[in-house]
Amino acid sequence: MERLFSSDIERLKKELEYRNYSERTVDSYCLTMATFEKCTGKRLSQLTVTDLKTYLHYALTVKNCSISFANQNISAFKIFTVDVMLKEWDGFKIKRPRRVQKLPEVLSLDEVERMITATANIKHRAMLTIMYSAGLRRMELLQLKPGDIDSERMIIKVKQGKGKKDRFTLLSTKALELLRLHYRLNRPKTYLFEPNGRAGMEVSEKTIDQIVKQSAKRAKISKIISCHTLRHSFATHLLEKGVNIKIIQEFLGHTSIKTTSRYLHLTNLNPSNVRSPLEEMEI
């Protein structure tokens, strides 16, 4: 159903679409600013930086909204102010809230194996296996199509991932075997994974979230995990195997190496397995 927005939000929507933002981001930014309008009782073009700061202070301190929520509001309001209203952006007047630096939860190799083997449904097992073995985001998994699997080169092409970027990532031989079994049993029409009885449709995000939590419960894993936990685990396990961090960055589709570097804090590297460069010298 087409959402009804104010004329200001419609102008923001057109600007975002013109700049080729993803449909998900366009929808999210517009809804964010529509909520801002509703809470203040003013049109977006009438709102100031001071209005936004007051609104975000209330959202963070009273409603316990997340830092991501605040940053999303700032980003959307900045685009409207600078690119739609063609005004100067007084960035120094609205600093972004400091993020709490938390390390992500990571599973051990044994825990990942238990999750996969505890999942009897072949389609669900294949979804977990691909998400972990290729380091995919949830939406990237759900939008995969059979043609994205290149069994000749043993790679998966991720089309229009986060930031509308294409990339290649790993295709495990064991994952490929499981995918072939899934394909023979379920015969997906458009997407690699489709809901039962709804050929050509994507599996919902809620469904894959439930699959991950149920598999973890069956595997008797007490950690609080999500789909992204499998991606975190993929990156951490590659680092522990000595894979170059730049290669892992490419697999994950990170724009900045800083994002990938946080996994260095999660690795269980054994210093006794590392040789000093001095050992290679004849001195």
Image (cartoon, helix red, strand yellow):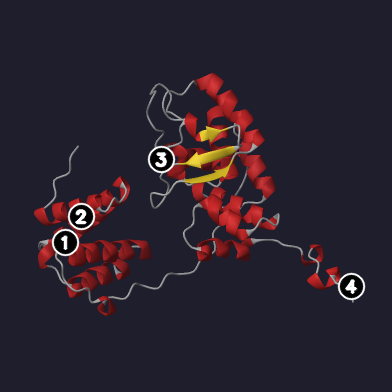
Q: Earlier in the sequence, mark 1 or mark 2?
A: 2
For the residues labelled 2 and 3, the Cα–Cα distance comes to: 30 Å
Quadrant containing the N terminus is top left
Viewer-side residue, 199 vs 255: 255
Vertical comparison of 69 with 108: above or below:
below
Residue at the disc numbered 4: 282
**Foreground residue, 148 or 116?**
148
Which mark lies nearer to you, 2 or 3? 2
Using the numbered discs, state the Cα–Cα distance from disc 1 to disc 2 in whole angstroms: 7 Å
The disc label shown at residue 84, or none: 1
Q: In the rendering, at what x and y percent does residue 83 appear?
A: 20, 63
Residue 136 position within the rendered picture, expressed as x and y whole percent measured from the top left: 51, 45
Q: Residue furthest bottom?
A: 92
Mark 4 and mark 3: Cα distance apart in space = 60 Å
Q: Earlier in the sequence, mark 4 or mark 3?
A: 3
* Secondary structure category for the residue under label 3: helix
**Tag 1: amino acid:** Val
Q: Which mark is residue 1?
A: none
Which residue is the site of mark 2?
Answer: 15
200 shown above or below 207: above
Report the mark closest to the observer, 4 or 1. 4
Q: Are marks 1 and 3 in contact (CB under 8 Å)?
A: no
Amino acid bearing label 3: Lys
Locate residue 93, reporting x and y percent: 25, 79
